[in-house]
Image: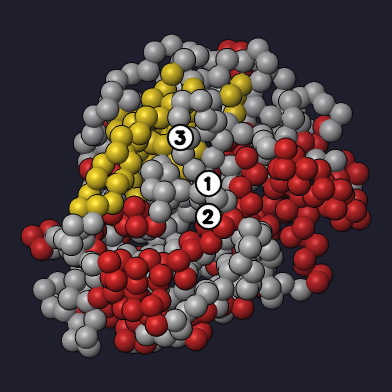
Amino acid sequence: MSSSNVLNAKQSTAFYSSLIVKNLPLKLSLGIACALSISACQPSDNIANTADDSKTQENGHSQTLTSARAQTIEALSGVSMQQLASFDAQEIKQGGDTGISITTSESYSKPSSNITASRKGSFFIGNAFFRQPWVVAPASTDSRDGLGALFNVAACQSCHIKDGRGHAPMSSEDDADSLLIRLAMPATTDEQRQKLKDSLIEKVVHPIYGGQLQDRGIQGVPAEARIAVQWIDKPITFADGHVETLRSPTFNLTKPGYGAFNDELMVSPRIALPMIGLGLLEQIPDEAIKKQAIKANKANGDISGKFNWVMDPQTGKVALGRFGWKAGQTKLITQNQSAFNEDMGLTSNIRPHESCMPTQTSCVKAVTGSDDQGNGKLAVEVNDEVAKFVEFYTRNLAVPHRRNADDKLVLAGKKRFYDMGCQSCHTPRYQLPKTEDDHLEQHGQVIYPYTDLLLHDMGDDLADRTIAGKLPSKDLQVEFLANSYEWRTPALWGIGLAQTVNPQATFLHDGRARTLMEAVLWHGGEAEKQKQKVLTLDKQGRTELNAFLTSL
């Protein structure tokens, strides 16, 4: 952590201590926790047949968008495609009435603007938990001890810098604080294959290293490995001769702490996602996501999409996944507590077991920070009160308003975005319902996240590989129903401020893209047709498209 970050952490501790002491028991006022965003039988309605995949909408928008897909987008939006592609004053408030108009490094760190004073205290308490590090047990601050024994980070600010996205390490000497490695093995038995098909398990984990690599360990517990990356330049040429230089990563795991890796081990590097707007995405109805799953006409290279069907660790039932790079988490409370467990080695009521594998004896025997909860509950390190504050915080990080939405250059770029059919995956607008829950800030909002929350095959270039560098088969599941080629469409709101919030922020799941144009040019698979259209843009067209994206 840099000296400036340390200073900010100290200042925030002093500020929040007055809030915490007034609202929590003394024990909790000493503890600061955080949650990291990382990360079935497949139901028959997972794939919705289109009415006529060869027919296109006739109102002047993209010829790459099928009629059925256009109708679905309009139904979800409540407005016409023509209105979506034009200037819409309502779209300035991407997060509806929850949004903010801040355009500084604090753009991702403010509460929903419609939050009441009586609820704002819970946000700031959650913010304090989010910022501060956990420590190794035993410690005097016993309500936030129990880090590890194997872990990736001790505090989420190491990963979600100012609540923003992470970045890939530039060299083998750089820390991988805001990037982690998920692991999966091919199924080898009929029982494993059936459990994966039914979403009863997330993946087949490595027998020694588990399902996520922890590159740190407390004293006396060896880290599982170190993460190293090598970059290779990859030039790509536009129709007018302009050359954009992409960078292609090769991730290596060095210094294995518990024996050699298997060549067939599938390795998935993932940077931290931004934290804004998560409570709004959580309120999008399941049916709105399901109805966007489209059966592709592969002969025409159409966009398709499927939703992930995952085991909810809180309920023990399969449910729709919507969070994480592969939509492997159902809701914020489970995402947060899964991240406590896998990223920080912390137990909770939803994830009550240490993240050690049985063969990692030094990890298994390490002292924990678990506290007795009474009422027959297991002793855990993150109790329900802490978890609820963190959930409230992650639910209410506001989405910044758009900038220059009515600018001619921005509107020209928006038209190009729609003409090329980018909205086929990046669904622009939703109308949220008013539900019978405590998510008051999110109720009934009209939002513009630009995502369908579905999985899409993004092609070989963006697919995860085995540790031996080979492409896995597409029938190998690595995160419930998702394979190595499939990624959930990320929300685009706030993306124009990503590098204002964190100048080192990068894009795509593994952080390979340094700019938004680089991210676009890595699109392949289902989005190959859209990428080829982008490559026909001249300098003016590229400027316009970039102006639109940076206005979000």
Q: Which residue is mark 1?
A: 504
- Residue 65 location, quadrant: bottom left
Camera-side residue: 538 or 531?
Answer: 538
Q: Quadrant of residue 500?
A: bottom right
Residue occupying image coordinates x 14% and y 72%: 53
Q: Residue furthest left?
A: 299
How many C-alpha atoms fall within 10 Å of the one at disc 2: few (<14), some, or many (≥20)?
Answer: some
> Residue 354 appears at what percent x and percent y?
61, 28
Q: Which mark is residue 170?
A: 3
- Left or right of 356? Residue 320 is left
Which residue corresponds to mark 2?
499
Residues under numbered marks 2 and 1 in contact, where contact means CB atoms less than 8 Å apart:
yes
Separation of marks 3 and 2 at Cα, in angstroms:
16 Å
Q: Position of residue 452 (x, y in %)?
A: 38, 65
Going by the numbered disc 2, the residue's amino acid type is Gln
**Sooner in the amino-acid sequence: mark 3 or mark 2:** 3
Sequence-wise first label, 3 or 1: 3
Q: Position of residue 153 (x, y in %)?
A: 61, 34
Indicate the amino acid at tag 3: Met
